[in-house]
Image (cartoon, grey):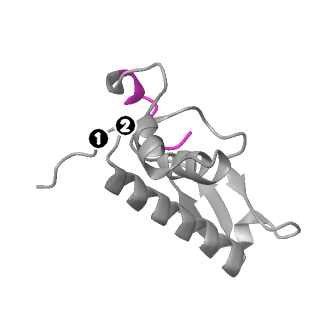
């Protein structure tokens, strides 16, 4: 039985939970999923330009785990852009800044 995932700290929810090509109804698109911790990793590394060590520390994970989260997030975004798919930001194992992991368990999953 694998170990349960450790909650990753995130600053907050994104302003939008779906991104899609303009002019195509969502029901006609395939979907790529970006986890909320993946969104946070992209925000820290690419949006704020933080190094791996500092970004990992802010999320409460190891540098290796942060790199894995970031790699998966970049893959999801690239797949959505290159293949013209919808990108949904949902799910993951996270806690919001200012909450402990116990409180965040009620918010886990889609938002």
> Is residue 76 left or right of 66 when viewed as pictured?
right
Residue 60: which disc?
2
> Residue placed at 48% from the left, 43% from the top?
55
Contact, CB < 8 Å: mark 2 with mark 1? Answer: yes
Q: Residue at x 66, y 40 (%)?
A: 14
Q: Does 87 lie within the magenta span?
A: no
Mark found first going from the N terminus, 2 or 1: 1
Crowd tier of the residue under label 1, counting other residues whose Cα lies within 10 Å: few below 14, some 14–19, many 20 or above: few
Of badges 2 and 1, the one in the foreground is 2
- Please report the bounds of the magenta region as a residue range: 103-111
Left or right, 21 with respect to 44, comes to: right
In the picture shown, does residue 22 fall above or below 99? below
SS category of the residue bearing label 1:
loop
What secondary structure do most residues of the magenta stretch adopt?
loop
Return the x and y of residue 58 as percentages of the image width and height: 45, 35
Q: Is residue 2 left or right of residue 98?
A: left
Q: Residue at x 32, y 47 (%)?
A: 62
Q: Nearer the viewer, residue 83 or 75?
A: 75
Residue highlighted by disc 1: 6
The quadrant of the image that shows the N terminus is bottom left
Tag 2, which secondary structure? Answer: loop
């Amino acid at each position: 039985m694998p170990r349960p995932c450790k909650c990753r700290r995130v600053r907050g929810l994104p302003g939008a939970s779906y991104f899609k090509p303009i002019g195509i109804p969502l029901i006609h698109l395939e979907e790529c999923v970006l986890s909320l911790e993946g969104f946070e990793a992209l925000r820290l590394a690419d949006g704020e330009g933080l190094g791996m060590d500092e970004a990992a520390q802010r999320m409460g994970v190891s540098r290796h785990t942060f790199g894995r989260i970031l790699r998966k997030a970049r893959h999801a975004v690239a797949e959505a852009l290159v293949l013209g798919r919808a990108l949904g930001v949902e799910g993951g194992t996270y806690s919001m800044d200012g909450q402990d992991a116990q409180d965040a368990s009620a918010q886990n999953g889609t938002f």
